[in-house]
Image: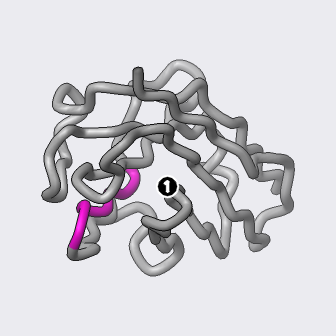
Amino acid sequence: EVQLVESGGGLVQAGGSLRLSCAVSVFTFEDYAIGWFRQAPGKEREGVSCISGKDGTTYYADSVKGRFTISRDNDKNTVYLEMNSLKPEDTAIYYCAVAQVPTVVTTTRRYDYWGQGTQVTVSS
């Protein structure tokens, strides 16, 4: 069974930075795309970023482009989301998820496994 564990969330002031980690227990980690999503209170879950399996192609939502950076370490089965210049509107629970394809996936329903989430709160 695939398991994902997010970490790195917390409380930060606007303009600050956080780095989220997503540790994935899966045998062939490099074959899967990993995505980061977030859900704020009263809002739908939205895609934030995604990284493909082997070639490291990335995708970013317009709302985070230029501020967030996704990366992966296939030796550690871990994906990171470096978040800079954080804004209050970035406040949400952040989830990582696995899609069982090697290419970038931007559709939420194509993700098969999800972590429990980590809270990110940005104060103004």
Reading the image, the residue beneath label 1 is 77
Exactly how many numbered labels are in the figure? Answer: 1
Look at the numbered disc 1 and give the secondary structure of its residue: loop
Q: Quadrant of residue 41?
A: top right
Q: In which quadrant will I find the N terminus? A: top left
Image point (31%, 48%), residue name: 28
Q: Specify how the rendered protein is coloured.
A: one colour
User: Residue 50 colored magenta?
Assistant: yes
Name the residue furthest front. Answer: 27
Callout 1 environment at 10 Å: few (<14), some (14 to 19), or many (20+)? some
Q: Of the residues shown, which amino acid type is indicated by label 1? A: Asn
Residue closer to the observer: 84 or 82: 82
Relative horizontal placement of residue 87, taking residue 68 as reference (left or right): right
* Rendered view: 103 above or below 120: below
Image point (76%, 44%), residue name: 121
User: Which x, y percent locates residue 96?
Assistant: 47, 41
Residue closer to the observer: 23 or 17: 23
Please give the range of residues in magenta.
Answer: 48-54
User: Which x, y percent locates residue 64?
Assistant: 45, 65
Image point (84%, 57%), residue name: 12
* Rendered view: 88 above or below 41: below
Q: In which quadrant will I find the C terminus? A: bottom right
Q: Quadrant of residue 117?
A: top right
Image point (69%, 64%), residue name: 19
* Rendered view: 9 above or below 86: above
User: Which x, y percent locates residue 5?
Assistant: 61, 36
User: Which x, y percent locates residue 32?
Assistant: 25, 49
